[in-house]
Image (cartoon, rainbow, N blue to C red):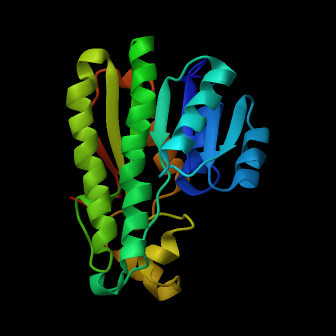
Amino acid sequence: MRLANKVAIVTGGAQGFGLGIVERFAAEGARLLIADLKADAAIAVAAKCPDAHAVAADVSRSADWAHIVRSALDAYGRIDIVVNNAGTSHRNRSLLEVDEAEFDRVYAVNVKSIFHSAQHCVPVFRRQGGGCFVQIASTAGVRPRPGLTWYNGSKGAVIVTSRSMAVELAPENIRVNCINPVAGETPLLATFMGEDTPERRAQFRATIPLGRLSTPQDIANAALFLASDEASMITGACLEVDGGRCV
């Protein structure tokens, strides 16, 4: 029960890595606010947790972040942990084939969401005397692969922004850390690969020394540690959960 009585917001919590994080946090005693574009899926996940609420939200919108934070405070009176997990990508293809609207959407969801979360959550953390962010970035931000140039750039921005936040907010006992997953068993996998075939999966696995893709449970275990009091001396870290790919 490493998160007993702690209140955690998890964005994109209805599927993929976010769902794994929600399930792990719930098992460790957290009270949860699950935010996801898919309201019905978020409600279904919340119903399976001991203590959770769900809200429909687009993390690229300030008004939706205001709703997320207000809902958490109305339900629980405080916020201890914010997991910025929601993300998106363009399909794996030439950088010149990605149009401006798609580029804007990738940066809005992956990067602008961090801005909005800070704008709405940092004041709450300050009033409470502390809190922590766990940002789900990507190995794409430290070891980019061809075909995902604009996605790679967005995750690089998440990493640098988070490290800067960590330094600036440390005097106020607000920790900020990143997790960099390698490609995993999530709904975005086919987007990353361009197509989901046994051959493409084999090519991806061949780049990972441990020989497998990441799982939601792998990412959830890392998020649990960084969100817990066991990591109270850790801020500005970027933890690769990648089977050795970035070595």
Q: Nearer the viewer, residue 24 or 177?
A: 177
Task: Please identify the quadrant where the N terminus is shown.
Answer: top right
**Where's residue 195, x and y in %?**
49, 85
Is 46 left or right of 90, judged from the image as shown? right
Residue at figure coordinates x 26%, y 63% from the top left:
153
Q: Is residue 182 visible?
A: no
In this picture, is 192 found above or below 72?
A: below
Q: Is residue 56 visible?
A: yes
Is 158 left or right of 91, judged from the image as shown? left
Residue at figure coordinates x 28%, y 81% from the top left:
95
Number of marks in picture: 0
Residue 235, picture quadrant:
top left
**Where's residue 210, x and y in %?**
36, 62
In this picture, is 223 found above or below 228?
A: below
**Where's residue 2, x and y in %?**
53, 23
Task: Please identify the quadrant where the C terminus is shown.
Answer: bottom left
Residue at figure coordinates x 70%, y 40% from the top left:
54
Residue 200, picture quadrant:
bottom left
**Where's residue 157, x and y in %?**
26, 53
Q: Nearer the viewer, residue 52 or 226?
A: 52
Residue 233, picture quadrant:
top left
In this picture, is 179 found above or below 192?
A: above
